[in-house]
Structure formats: structure tokens, C-alpha cells
Image (cartoon, helix red, strand yellow):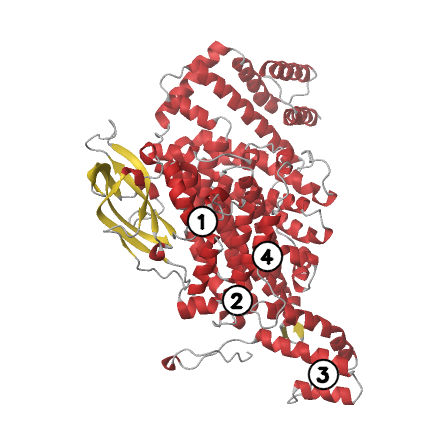
Amino acid sequence: MAWIVSLLVVIGGLFVLTRRKVELLPATAIYLGALILLTALDLVPGILAWVLWPVGVFLVFLNLPDLRQRYLSSPMLKYMRKALPPISNTEREAIEAGTVWWESELFRGNPDWSRLFEVPTPGLSEEEQAYIDGPVERLCEMLDDWQITHELNDLPPEVWKFMARERFWGINIPKKYGGLEFSPEANSAIVLKVTSRSATAGVTVMVPNSLGPAELLLHYGTDEQKDYYLPRLARGEEIPCFGLTNPVAGSDAAAIPDYGVVCEGDFEGKTVLGLRLNWQKRYITLGPVATLLGLAFKAYDPDHLLGEQEDLGITCALIPTGTPGVNIGSRHYPLNSAFQNGPNSGENIFIPLQWVIGDREWVGKGWRMLMESLAAGRGISIPASSVAAAKVATRTSGAYARIREQFGIAIGKFEGIEESLARIGGLTYMMDAARLLTTSGLKLGEKPSVITAIVKYQLTESARQVVNDAMDIHGGRGICMGPRNYLARSYQQIPIAITVEGANILTRSMIIFGQGAMRCHPYLLSEINAASDENTGSREFDALIMAHMGYSTINAARAFVLGLSLGHLASVPPGRDAATTKYYRHFARYSAAFAFLGDVTLLMLGGELKRKEKLSARFADALGYLYLGTAVLKRYEDTGQPRTDLPLVEWACQHCLYNIQDALDGVLRNFPINVVGKLLRGVVFPLGRREKRPGDHLGQQVAKLLLTPSDCRDRLTEGIYLKQDESDLLGCLEDALHKVLAADPIRRRLKSKGEALPPRVDYEVWIEGLVKDEVITVQDAAVLNQAYKATLNVIAVDDFEPMHAGVTESTGEAA
């Protein structure tokens, strides 16, 4: 009885902490009063007393400022100054780049749902929609991906001209410079639609509108630079590229050996101040055809022509590729994709200081420029291209699985195929939700560096899974290359997105949690800055430590109480669909668990956590799935809570929750101090691991949504290029799907009468016989024949003449 009463009192106290902030002094008084009363009533068992009374003594100690500063704050300050590794300027610039947004709510353990639902519902302006319905649609009509990737290894000349004329490279450029000045949502929608037709064309559109000269000029260029270059870029008179990666500095981009030395030199007949450059770059997209090269290099000033500092840091400049000495034009060949990509170099090339983006003022500040500008590539372009691949895989796999039959049954009705279809549908819904929420944040002016790293990593990895599942469903239809194949190039090229804009292994294991902890934690960066500043006294540091301890205590209480109640005690935003209420509670519970566990890990490991990359990666997984899961809930609300979408919502939420649980469990199982890991498990998982993967029944519901035309299926694949035309690459599937479904009632009627295609009899001859025997009508026969021909068209694969004779036009025989 004593145990039960004591535990109820403790849990009740912790519950109060989860609901309201309590100051230290009254909290101490309440705690001691309750403990004294329980002890007087003999309701505190001996073992529990050995825990509760020391806690009380510690609380009293915390209420004595002089003693606390002398024996707690000062020693901690000395420890941090000794233990923490110094933060380099490049690390600091990366940490401080961009803004924090919704991810900070998830990181801190008590998400304010109103902040999420204050984000406007995604949508395009009339002008943006007209551009997608007009020039983007026409561009897609011009694209033949087999011709581009196999025959030309390039976009056709007329496509290059059309892109320039319609200002596809000026999506972000303000109208006063001749650009389109579209929103991040429109940018994403354009890239998605073009990529759904051709990844090569998609890359050619996305690169000039992400990290490149235009983006950097808009934020850091001088008025003179903007006035000259931005109109030329918008009109397509300049083709831009940006060179960062060096052969010996890939992921460690801050270590590039490319350099420029400040000196005087001759330029246009005058002696001017500038830089003499030496560089070697590779993997530079659009490089082989670029007319304007954005270049990152390290600037040095040994003669102190700009000031006292010699090592100035990374600098960005704009160099016309026609400049004598620039070596550019050769190509790489990235996984059978035909987008222009290649190396470039320069030796002892002098440029005037005015070619530095931002002129003299921004010499040495290039790393900050790059870190703040990465959001466009990570948050818009790559997620959009990944979602495009997933949506095409979703639309085609569902249709193909309904059209294709084996053993007399549509293959989509086999449970093995259902399992893959469920993953395809659920992951695609999740991916698109994250894409839309992220572009909405960017539209609000946010530059959330942590979120953009999350979506870059999570959406490219999810796209890999979706495309792999689609290939499994299509079987031989998917692996035979040719004009009819709509999946193989995506399958080949997925690793490109995995690699660029920060390789996924690096992004997951080092960037997301490392940068997230610094930016999203309410006290960590301030504590590090205080410890780094020798002028910081114990009193100032004490205030930070006390605030941090209060934050940690509340998160510990929330994690334990919400874990003990399986999330039922978490608050839910008002006005939400009853079917999704439980998911809000679960995500709130895991947000608290993540915040508590992350805080303890940072406290115990300190700077050592930088070298515990697998632990950091698991925290990144947990934070990533918290973001994806809440994005799913936001999308469901934004689309008006359509009940038909609920299977997709529930599958995605359950998938995210299971993976959050798995990530946190991985942290605990591999915690460097085993005993501490076991104690923490009691707080994070007081009732054990309770989350399950999405079940078979739910998966079956998701799969069914992909197999038949519906508003839900259209919403799921909205934004891709699609025509109801039997001669179109994807349109033939839509055409066949409708014809097969129209024929289904007739086929079921024939089956019920025992009618079946006899061996060695042509299908159309059999149908003609059924008409003669008055088993079916002439109209029925037409429907059946149309469905049969459409099915043969869909399952057909390409074959070619022997290679020694050259590749000729595909015969398109059915497999």
C-alpha cells in the first residue's frame, strides 16, 4: 500500500510539472512538505526513501545561490572550458546559418501545435498555376526521355531554346530584373512536374534556381552585379553553374585547396586590385555548357593589401567561362543521366576584386553565404525531384498491378504485391507532406537549415525504397530498357540525389542532430558561448545552468508521464479529426522522450558526441520522423480531412512512430555508459516498446487506393505530367486501367457462366464466337477487345536489333 501511495504522489507531481511551470522555491517547498507528510504517515518505503530524501536535499542546495555557484556552476564552467573542443569559424558559420522553425518545437519536447497550424495551406497563385499549365506543360510535351538519355545524351536544341525563352532559369529572380519571382511552392511544383517527365530536364531547371550565381547574387551581390547579371540569367543569355567540390575535398567542402591570392594585376588595360586564382573542380552540374561560373575558393592576403588578416577564408566569385585560362567543357557521365555535368579548372587566372560576389566587403565570407543558401537545393529542388520519382512510381505501379494478371488474378491482389504497394503509397504521402510543409516554411521567409537537411536525407532515401518496390512489382517490364520504360532511369539515377548537396551518410550522422542540437536547444549554444568567453563569470553561467536544469527536469517528467500513459495525457490541438487525435498525442510523447534523451546524452558525452556518429545518426532519425509525421498530420488538415485519405495518413504516422521508437531504442541499447542507458530506458520506455509497424489490414487498404481511379489516388499523385492518351508513356497505363475496369463486370459474368479462353485459340476469335453464341453483345465484345489490346500495350517491352547493327527502333513486342 505504501508503495502505491508513494508512486501515485510522485507521478502526480510529475504530471503537474508537465502541465505548468513551477518556480524552484515553491517546488522545493511542495516537494519537502509532501515528503515529510508521507514519511509521518509511514507511506514511504525504506528503499524509496533512499531516493526521495537525497532529491529533497539537492533541491534545498539549489535554493542556496552562493553554495550552488561555488560547488556546482563554477566547477561545471571549468569542466566545459576544458572538455569542449574549440569551434572553428567554419563550424560556427554552419551552426549559425539559417533559422530555426517547427523543428525547434519538436526538439524541445513540448510542441506548440498552434505554431504548425498557423502555417498557411500550400497553394499557387493564378500566375504560377498558369505558368505550370502553359510553359511547363508544353516543355513536358517536348521531352522524350529515351531520346534524351540514349540517343542524344543531351536535351534537344529546341528544348534549350524553349527553356531560355520561357525563363525557366529565372524562377526565383525578381520581376524587376526580368525574372518570374515565383514562390518556393511554385519552384517545387515546376521541378516536380518536369522531373516526372525527364530527370535530365528537371536537373537543368532546378540547378540555376537553387545554389548558384542567381541565388547568391540576390542575397549578397552588389547593385551593379545584380543589375548586370540577373537580367541576363533570367532571359537565359547566361547559363550558370557553381563550382565547390574539389577532387580532394568532397563532403569536407570547407577544406577545399582551391585558392586565390590578393594582388595587383592588369585588367582591361589598367592595374587593379584583385585575386590570382588556382582551382580544380569536378561534379559541376551545367559546367560543360555554362557561360558563367560561380567559384568557391580560399582567399589569402600575404601582402596585407586588404587588412591585417592573411587567411581571409572561403570566398565566392563570378567568372565568365570565356575568361582566358578557364578550362571547362568536358563531361562526366552520371549513371546514364544526360544532364550536363563535368570538371573545370584554372591556373594563375587574375580576376578583379569586383568579380567577388558582394565585392570587397564579402571577401572571406563565402562559407556563410553557401550555408545560408543551401536551403534552396536541400529544401526545394532535391525533395521535389524525389517526390516526382515516387509519384510516378505510385501512379504506374498501382495501374500496372491492376492491369497485369497472373494465375487469372490481378497481381495487385496478391499479398506480396500488396505489401510493396502499401509502402509505395504510404511513403509517397509522407514525402509529399514533408515537401509541402517545407516549401510553406520557405515561403514564410524561413531558412530552416536543419529541416532542409532532414527532407534532403529522408525524401531521397524514401524515394529509393519506393522506386525499388516499383521495380519489384514491374518485374521484367521494369528492367528492360527502351522507349517504353518509365522506371529504369529513376532506378539508375536515385544515387545521384543521395550523393549531392551533402551525401546522405554525412547528413544523417553529422549534420542533422549536430546542427539541430546547437540551433534548436534553448540553452546549449549560449552555454558553449559562455564557456568560450573568458569574461563570463560563474553568476552568468549559473543562470544558464539553472534554466537548463529546469528545462531538463520538465522534459524528464513529460517523457516519463507521457510514456507511462502511452501518450494519453498529452494535449491535443482543438478541432482535429478524432481519427488522428492519438497520433498528435504519440508525437508529443516522443518529442518529450527525444528532448530528454538528447539532453542527457549531450550532458554526459559533451564534445565526445561529435565522434559518436552512430548515436548522432539515430537521434537524426528520431527528429526526422517527428518532422515527417507531423507534416503528415498537417497535410491531412490542409486537404480538408478527406476520409478516403485516412489509410494513407495512418500508415505514414504508424511508420514514423515505429521508426522514432526504433531510433531511440538504438540510442539506449548503444549508450556508451551501459548502466545509464538502462536507467534512461525506464524513463523513455516505462512500459516497453509498444509501437508496431503498419499492419497487414491497413496495408491492404492503402494498396487498394492505388489500384483504382479515385480522388484519393489523384491527390496522392498530383503534380506529375500525365495525359489520358494511349500513345503517351504514362497515358497508356491510365487508358488501359480504365478499359480493364470497364471490362471487369463482363469478365465476371463470363466466369460465372463457366466461359474461359480455350487453349490454342486467339482471344479475338474466342470473343467473336461468344457474340455469335449470344453469350455477350457486340458492345460487350468491343469493351473486352479494347481492354485486351490495351493490356498487351501496357505489358509490352522493347527489343532491338543486334547491337553490331546499331540500335534501331523498338518493336515493342509483348512479354
Which residue type carries mark 3? Ala
Q: What element carries label 1?
A: helix
In the picture of the structure, the residue carrying the numbered disc 1 is 234
Between the residue at mark 3 and the residue at mark 1, the CA separation in whole angstroms equals 62 Å
> Which one is closest to the eye, mark 4 or mark 1?
1
Among numbered discs 2 and 4, the one appearing first in the sequence = 4
Q: Is mark 2 on a helix, strand or loop?
A: loop
Q: Which of 200 and 767 is in front in this view?
A: 200
> Which one is closest to the eye, mark 2 or mark 1?
1
Can you say which quadrant of the picture contains the N terminus? top right
In the picture of the structure, the residue carrying the numbered disc 2 is 486
Q: Is mark 3 on a helix, strand or loop?
A: loop
**Relative to 274, does residue 435 appear above or below in the rendering?**
below
Among numbered discs 2 and 1, the one appearing first in the sequence = 1
Residue drawn at point x = 67 percent, y = 34 percent: 570
Which residue type carries mark 2? Tyr
Which residue type carries mark 1? Ala
**Relative to 81, does residue 679 appear above or below in the rendering?**
below
Badge 4, how many Cα within 10 Å: few under 14, some, many 20+?
few
Percent x, y of residue 358: 36, 36
In the picture of the structure, the residue carrying the numbered disc 3 is 756
Percent x, y of residue 625: 56, 44
Between the residue at mark 2 and the residue at mark 1, the CA separation in whole angstroms equals 32 Å
Among numbered discs 4 and 1, the one appearing first in the sequence = 4
In the picture of the structure, the residue carrying the numbered disc 4 is 133
